[in-house]
Amino acid sequence: MLFTTIVLSALATSTLAFPFKEFEKRNGGHKSNDPQASLPECNADPVACRCPADSFYQTSSSYSFWPVHASEITRLTVNFLDAAWLGTTPERTEGNGTAVGAKRYLRTELPDSQKAELVMEELTELTLRPDGGYYSKFRMGDAPFWYEKKTPGKKGLIAGSWDNIDVRDINGMAYMLWDIHVCFMDLFDLSGFHESAMNNLTSILKAEGKIPQGAATIGPITF
Ligand SMILES: *[C@@H]1O[C@H](CO)[C@@H](O)[C@H](O)[C@H]1NC(C)=O
Ligand SMILES: *[C@@H]1O[C@H](CO)[C@@H](O)[C@H](O)[C@H]1NC(C)=O
């Protein structure tokens, strides 16, 4: 490496600078190197992707197992327009909560936001499973979403957000996986939110007497 550098410097400063220029050209020049430029723009696909300017990629996956039938978790979570298990109620809804195209408008605190913002989410896929579980996809519907921050003149950006929820029966236990990837300007506690929602489900099932005495719940676990 050092040897190459010395040789190249020698060439560059000599009248034989020509080969050095050729090398630079082939290399694309250090300053313009952007390895991420070849990635696709982020969308619902769970692949390596490039977030739009002013935002960066964050991802999180959490799961839990409950000692109940998968249909119990489906009952509490499958209706996209009923967000009680998320500890909230949509301010406005559109469509049918168990049909693709349903929209919910949630009043949400965003990082350093001046006020709670109304964020729209849209159900884009829902498949009910024969085992009582389901698979769903939803996304933030009105991205890119700019908002006012507390600091005057400063703006925040949510450039995209894509969720997958997978509920199924595994050996007689209900399993839920919640996976998300986002393009946000600020760091967001995605796993904290998902774990709190899963803990809510545990509380609701306990309050309903659905969890048998002494039966173990596993998770939430984030990986
Ligand atoms: C869910 O948890 C939130 C706090 O994380 C709480 O405000 C809310 O009341 C809980 N909802 C239910 C239905 O347990
Ligand atoms: C909502 O959609 C589901 C599935 O497409 C359907 O079975 C149900 O009847 C619809 N509910 C209403 C209120 O339209």
Image: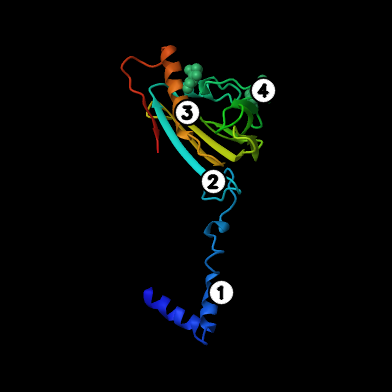
The residue under the point 52% across, 21% down is: 87
**Where does the image place residue 37, in percent across and percent down from the top left?**
57, 57
Disc 2/disc 3 C-alpha distance (Å): 37 Å
Disc 2/disc 1 C-alpha distance (Å): 30 Å
Disc 1/disc 4 C-alpha distance (Å): 56 Å
Sooner in the amino-acid sequence: mark 1 or mark 3: 1
The residue under the point 42% across, 20% down is: 202
Sooner in the amino-acid sequence: mark 2 or mark 1: 1
Q: Which residue is mark 3?
A: 131
Give the camera-side residue of 47 and 194. 194
Disc 1/disc 3 C-alpha distance (Å): 59 Å
- Mark 2 neighbour density, 10 Å: few (under 14) some (14–19) many (20 or more): some
Sooner in the amino-acid sequence: mark 1 or mark 4: 1
Residue 98 visible to an observer of this rendering: no
Q: Nearer the viewer, mark 1 or mark 3?
A: 1
Q: Which residue is mark 4?
A: 92
Q: Secondary structure at mark 1?
A: helix
Sooner in the amino-acid sequence: mark 4 or mark 2: 2
Badge 2 amino acid: Phe
Residue 88 visible to an observer of this rendering: yes
Q: Residue furthest left?
A: 214
**Where does the image place residue 58, in percent across and percent down from the top left?**
50, 42
Q: Which residue is mark 1?
A: 25
Q: Is residue 30 above or below residue 72?
A: below
Q: Residue furthest right?
A: 94
Q: Is residue 137 left or right of residue 220?
A: right
Q: Which mark is residue 56?
A: 2
Q: Secondary structure at mark 3?
A: loop
